[in-house]
Amino acid sequence: MHNLNTVIRFEITRTLKKKSFWIAAFAVPIIAALVGMIIFFSNKTTDVQTKKLATERYSVGVTDAAELINPTLLKSIDAHPIQTKSAGEEAVKAGKLDAYFYYPADVSKESVGVYGKDVGLFKNSRYQDLADQLLKQSTAASTSPAVRSVLQGSVKYDAITFTKSGEVDKGFMKLIAPGIFLVLFYFMIATFGNQILTSVTEEKENRVIEMILATIKPTSLLVGKLLSLITLAFIQMFVILVPIIIGYLIFKDQLALPQFDLSAIPLDPVAISLGAVIFIVSFLMFTGILMTLGAAMPTAKEAGSFFGAAMALVFGPLYAAPLFVTSPDSPVVQFLSYFPLTAPIPLLLRNAVGNLALHEALISIAILIATTIFVVSIGVRIFRFGALEYSRRLSLKEVMGRKN
């Protein structure tokens, strides 16, 4: 136990002292802050330009063959009546008019003609916007408010569905709390997975593994590394997420970010508990797999070549995500949910949408725990026999064939 604690303290302290750890941790919130600033200033500049365009005055000619446009609106913009389409187009070409709008006799069959003087790619859109506004405001005045709401797509709907128990269904809101664990799993593996894979090979490449194994058992060393890496992953996740959350709370209004009422999020204790257990066990299993692969490789470079394959194996089921939602009883979904190397994503997603039965979850969790124990034990065995192998990778057959 003393050696295990020593390994954990050493690994955590050594990693926390590395500049690369903190650079990787703070890079995400810093990049998020820079992107937020770019969005803010871009939206602000666009709003200023839009308001400026709305107040600009320019000469306009109009031919209203359908007699749809309200004469009062045409008078308000000092529009000049044009007899023919060709005359209006020639007036714009000659520079006599800045813009010309041609409204055909039947706008449902023919296109509205918009002609304008080139004033730049961004400003050229003002012509079509004005022509569209003239048409909409004119036709809106001739219809009732109810019909206008239907045509504009502004009718509001209050859709309410009820669960089997008669309670109001929360819809997508109920996915948020248990779905957080799916996001966390992807986030932690994507940001910390490669470091887990190569951590075991560091001592091999540094040629200090002989001295370490002289005082520490391979089991204590590998398990200590496993626990320390999990701790470091949570530290890095905390360092990344806290600034992002604080930035969201402070600048959500300035950046026009969506508002969330946290009190409206339903909290299902069973779904949240299952999500937390599946997340923890899945992360332990995946960490064990990466460390086992790293223990079998002679160098960190060779170990890194397997990271893509490991990621594809675990996150490959995301391509079948619609199937997990619509057909949870299909053989493919059942296989992916019970097979330990593909189970994390299906289990976390199905738990979030609410179609993961309790007995399925318990069976899958038991399989994940058994797989984790098996993978870690294989990793310890590989590390014990392959710690001093600097030039070649070990095969599973070779490791299993040796005696303790």
Image (cartoon, rainbow, N blue to C red):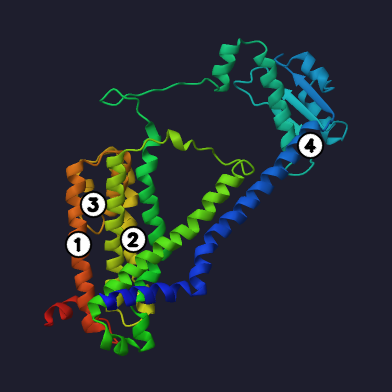
Marks 2/4 in contact by CB < 8 Å: the verdict is: no
Label 3: how many residues lie within 10 Å, few (<14), some (14-19) or many (20+)? some
Residue holding disc 1: 371
Marks 2/3 in contact by CB < 8 Å: the verdict is: no
Q: Nearer the viewer, mark 1 or mark 4?
A: 1
Q: Which mark is residue 290?
A: none
Q: Can you give x and y, in whole percent of width and height, for residue 351 in the image?
A: 29, 43
Tell me which label, 2 or 4, sits earlier in the chain: 4
- Identify the amino acid type marked 4: Lys
Q: CA gap, disc 2 to disc 3?
A: 14 Å
Tell me which label, 1 or 4, sits earlier in the chain: 4
The reply to whether residue 308 is visible in this rendering is no
Q: Nearer the viewer, residue 45 or 31?
A: 31
Which residue is at a point 54% across and 39% down the rendered structure image?
A: 258
Residue holding disc 4: 52
Label 2: how many residues lie within 10 Å, few (<14), some (14-19) or many (20+)? few
- Identify the amino acid type marked 3: Leu
Q: Nearer the viewer, residue 388 or 5?
A: 5
Residue holding disc 2: 312
Tell me which label, 3 or 4, sits earlier in the chain: 4
Q: Which mark is residue 336?
A: 3
- For the C terminus, give its image quadrant: bottom left
Left or right of 62 on screen, residue 159: left
